[in-house]
């Protein structure tokens, strides 16, 4: 039950889903108790920890923000790191958004497997749920409660012939994230296109504001 990190650095390139920007990322090992830290190599190696306190919003993509610096669509990569049981990792990235790959975590899982995983000296730090907590927002509901296992039960219900109502139960054990979860791909509907375009414009406005608010270097 010791912490883990990557055995060697590994890099890839891709395109951001919401911004269309070309992105280069490198996953590399990190010391014990580091967690996951994004390093914006295009902004003097500015660090953004993957921590709940830096979540800016989660509309169509999970976006982190620290001191006005934004990083978008990080959920698939973070899912792959957690699902592959990697505890500590630096993620070097040279743009505003993580590449979408094929819309799933599978491409990131392949990167992690190529890099390899090594055990570290410190024991893992685990989150223990002590009581049930529920949250509802419109027709969406979520709850978390104590359990002996890391277990997820989910239901989706969309009025579309390709989806309808679907349920899935998952227990995180024996590397089954790679077999059962990693290939699940994100999806969207045509009626959401306008909302997505507006989200892109808001992100672009923020990026321009961020650019011109930085002090000029002489």
Image (spheres, rainbow, N blue to C red):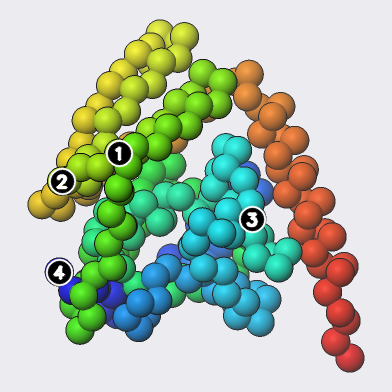
Q: Are marks 1 and 3 in contact (CB under 8 Å)?
A: no
Pointer 4 and pointer 1: residues touching (CB < 8 Å)?
no
Q: Quadrant of the N terminus?
A: bottom left
Marks 4, 1: nearer the viewer: 1
The residue under label 3 is 21
Mark 4 crowdedness (10 Å alpha carbons): few <14, some 14-19, many ≥20: few
Q: Can you identify the residue that label 2 sits on?
A: 148
Q: CA distance from mark 3 to mark 4?
A: 39 Å
Instruction: Give the distance between the C-alpha atoms of the residues marked 4 and 1, in whole angstroms.
Output: 23 Å
Q: Which residue is mark 4?
A: 1
Q: Identify the secondary structure beneath mark 2.
A: loop
Can you tell which of label 3 and label 2 is closer to the viewer?
2
Are the residues at dot 1 and dot 2 in contact (C-beta closer than 8 Å)?
no
Residue that sits furthest to the left in the current view: 174
* Dot in front, 1 or 3: 1
Location of residue 98 in the rendering, given as x and y in whole percent from the top left corner: 53, 57
| Sooner in the amino-acid sequence: mark 2 or mark 4 | 4
How far is disc 2 from disc 4 in space, using C-alphas?
16 Å
Q: Quadrant of residue 162?
A: top left
Mark 3 and mark 4 in contact? Answer it, CB < 8 Å.
no
Disc 3 or disc 4, which is closer to the eye? 4
Query: Residue 186: x and y, percent?
Result: 44, 35
| Residue reaching furthest to the front | 131
Q: Tell me the residue that label 1 is attached to.
A: 145
Tell me which numbered mark, 3 or 4, is placed earlier along the sequence.
4
């Amino acid at each position: 039950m010791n912490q883990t990190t990557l055995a060697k650095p590994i890099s890839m390139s891709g395109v951001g889903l919401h911004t269309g920007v070309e992105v280069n990322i490198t996953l590399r090992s990190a010391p014990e108790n580091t967690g996951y830290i994004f390093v914006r190599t295009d902004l003097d190696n500015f660090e953004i920890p993957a921590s709940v306190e830096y979540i800016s919003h989660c509309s169509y993509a999970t976006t982190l923000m620290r001191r006005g610096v934004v990083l978008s669509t990080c959920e698939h990569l973070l899912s792959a790191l957690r699902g592959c049981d990697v505890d500590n990792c630096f993620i070097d990235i040279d743009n505003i958004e993580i590449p979408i790959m094929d819309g799933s975590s599978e491409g990131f899982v392949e990167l992690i497997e190529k890099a390899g995983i090594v055990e570290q000296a410190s024991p893992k730090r685990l989150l223990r749920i002590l009581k049930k907590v529920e949250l509802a927002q419109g027709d969406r509901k979520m709850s978390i409660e104590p359990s002996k296992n890391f277990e997820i039960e989910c239901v989706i219900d969309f009025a579309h012939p390709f989806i309808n109502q679907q349920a899935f139960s998952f227990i995180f054990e024996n590397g089954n994230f790679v077999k059962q979860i990693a290939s699940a791909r994100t999806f969207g509907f045509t009626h959401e296109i306008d909302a997505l375009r507006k989200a892109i414009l808001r992100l672009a406005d923020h990026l321009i504001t961020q650019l011109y608010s930085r002090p000029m270097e002489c």
